[in-house]
Image (spheres, coloured by chain):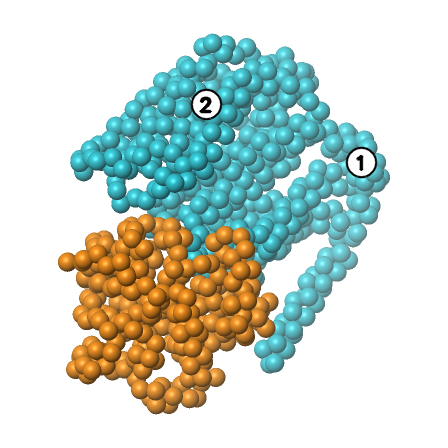
Amino acid sequence: MDRRNKRILQTTLIIVVVLGIIVSLYLYAGQRAFVSTIFSGLTLGSLFFLVAAGLTLIFGLMDVLNFAHGSMFMLGAYIGWQFYTNPTFIFGVAPLALAFGTGVMFISVLKPYLIAWNLTPRMQKLLPTIAYILAAVVIVFAVLGFDILGLANTAMVAMTTTTVGNPLAEISPQEPLAEFWIRPVLMMLGGLLIAFGSSKPGDKTQYAPKENLGKAMLLPAILLVVTVVSIFIRESAPVSVLLMNGNIRFLLSILVSVAFGFVFGAVIEIILIRPLYARPTFIILMTLGLSYVIRELVQFLWDPLTYQMARPPLFAMPGKAASIGEWLQNGNSTIDILGATVPTYRLFIIALGIVMFALVTLLMTKTRLGMIIRAGVQDPEMVEAMGINVKSVFTLVFALGVALATLGGIGAAPFLPVQPLMGDAYQTQGLITVVIGGMGSYVGAFVGAMILGMARAFGDYFALKLSLSPAIAEASTVIIMVIVLLTRPQGLFGSKE
Amino acid sequence: MSEVNHDDLLNVDNIHTFIGQFHILEGVSVRVKKGSITVMLGRNGAGKTTTLKSIIGLTPPREGKIIFDGMEIQGKRPYNIANLGIGYVPEHRAIFRQLSVLENLKLAERKKGDFERSSEFIFKLFPDLKRLYKLPGNHLSGGQQQMLAVARALVPENKLLLIDEPSEGLAPILIQQMMEAIETLSHTTTILLVEQNFIMASQLAKQYVIIDDGKSVSSGSIKDLVLQPEVIHRYLGASIKTRKELEMEHGSEE
Ligand SMILES: Nc1ncnc2c1ncn2[C@@H]1O[C@H](COP(=O)(O)OP(=O)(O)O)[C@@H](O)[C@H]1O
Ligand SMILES: [Mg+2]
């Protein structure tokens, strides 16, 4: 009973303090500035949440602190922006990536047969090495001459002209299908070789039953179909996408970005993280390195430039809407809320954050996967001993976490300059959010993100008003983190362990 | 060395298990006859838990064979082994504390409907759980947590249960209840039980195996073991407690 009273007292105290802060800010700033700063805070908070949600789930379940999360956020922005502005590049690369993925996925079909081979230990070591080298050669051969850079350049030209001219005019003619088809075929061969090598032929200590071969065939078969389709629509699809309504195109960009994040996350987990679970420090170094690789890759593909994505039509028309109805009808760029002028696109980001929080909550509390994740946060070994394939759950959670980050990236793209370093601030703030909210708690990530968003927004407001250094806003988040760590080391919603 | 015996549901044949660079099991053999309770005895730190974990695959053995239901299972992933029909009840009541009682049980399903099928039996065995099914695991008492840990293994259809020290730290009255539950289970399932309480163990089990210092040193019928006080004394020594000692030890608890 005593403990309960103490908790009630604590909660009341917190509520009183929070209300006090809110009221004094309101009185100090006045209604207009207060409302518009609140909306800035919610916007930042939503973006922080999209980054922190993945970080915290991945850390909670697998003890992996992903330092490449900010880079993945940035990559999501690039992919979505590219698709929105000129999808030629993405439709051009997709068949190659899909073909490669299809090849790799055939591992589940090949493995049961390959591990049954009778090989000398020497051959067991030699064969994968040969396969990897061959794969590298084949892949280089498939890509070489493929005009990735050229396509990216077209994309850039298209971008600089989209705001004025017609992006359709900027689509460059592509390699005809009669010559192109050999590339995806080679990529698939490369993927198959990698699948061959990594299934460790002859290694009988592995377990891969032949019984569920039908099930194992399913994913590669679907991927194969998708690959073939992507080869055929490669030339026509960019045009039809660009002819679409801008809002729908934006929605598609979001889907493309999320799908990309999911697949990218899964691939990273399987290839780079999985071999390192026994060595946690290596994982940190690896993800740090990966963040640089991603950044360099982006600079290589898109040049170290800054792009500004055009806002979709729903948020583009100059002028202020008086009501939500008017905005939805005309697509105004700002809206009047309680006397304050709030950019409508911010409302979209806030909605995105809240909807994703609701979806993550549903996932975690109402589905079997959520149950497995919550159990796995405590004891993954026991989850596995109950008959659940924890490794595949790890992959799934990593993929979902990265998909949330890329969603944040494309969500932020019309709002932030798209450039190679745009994810860094979100990486830092995401980590601080996770610490404040408690490692592994998605509710903590949401509350922490909103607190940080508010701190940033009001920090900026005061810096401007009192002519202080803008660094005060950044410092405020660190100060909050220190206060939380001192009073509640496990974070606001963290469990004690 | 190991002649094929079709009565054996599980045959652990001379396994060696390493944890990191530590050689923990240095030759453990355990045979579990179908349809009965086999008890694993031994001092603290002898390697009993590690033997169970080697069977379920959490600490896979580096050498030796484990044959379950006529199939070699060493080296398989734990989830594959569990799905062959092995339920594992870990020591220290390792339930999922953030999950409710119901969620703990639901999580144990291997196919849809497992819980519906088994819930009546489980709640008859442990009526407490039915009353508490909405509570999160960390709100349960020690005894209730232990019951949940056992109940979890009863949700799917299992051919073999590995139960690690179910009476550890329980009040005598709860120990009695737990032992009765395990006795009931043994009518339908084969059980490999780790139990420090020798009196309880000898009442429940037909077969025994003694683990000492990472090796299996003695095995056979428990009736024979009772007649060999020097073996008991040598390998189990201080770990044997009479019921009286137990009651004194736990009398003040709960
Ligand atoms: N993770 C570990 N790292 C190192 N040694 C361990 C680990 N787990 C168990 N051991 C050692 O293995 C031996 C056997 O442990 P265990 O199987 O838990 O014994 P028991 O269950 O019979 O009490 C003990 O000496 C213990 O110290
Ligand atoms: Mg033990």
User: Image height check: is B215 above or below A429?
Assistant: below
- Viewer-proximal residue among B107 and A360: B107
Query: What label does residue A188 carry, if any?
Result: none
Q: Helix, strand, or loop for circle 1?
A: helix
The residue closer to the viewer here, A21 or B143, is B143
- Mark earlier in primary sequence (1, 2): 2
Cβ of disc 1 within 8 Å of ligand 1?
no
According to the picture, the residue beneath numbered tag 2 turns out to be A96
User: Dot 1 falls on which chain?
Assistant: A
Give the left or right position of residue B223, taking residue A50 as reference. Answer: left
Looking at the rendered structure, the kind of residue marked 1 is: Trp
Question: Chain B hue?
Answer: orange
Residue B251, image x and y in percent? 42, 88
- Give amino acid for label 2: Leu
The residue closer to the viewer here, A403 or B36, is B36
Q: What is the distance, in whole Å, between disc 1 and disc 2 at their CAs? A: 42 Å
Residue at point 27%, 58% (across, down): B6
Left or right: where A188 falls relative to A311: left
In the rendered image, residue A21, in percent from the top left (x then y), is placed at: 70, 61
Look at 82% across and 46% down and name the residue there. A339
The residue that label 1 is drawn on is A327
At 80% from the left edge and 45% from the top edge, which residue is drawn? A337
Query: The N terminus of chain A lies in which quarter of the figure?
Result: bottom right
Q: Are marks 1 and 2 in contact (CB under 8 Å)?
A: no
The picture places residue A374, in percent across and down from the top left corner, at 51, 57
- Chain A in the picture: what colour? cyan
Q: Which subunit holds the residue at mark 2?
A: A
Q: Look at the image and tell me whether residue A173 can be seen.
A: yes
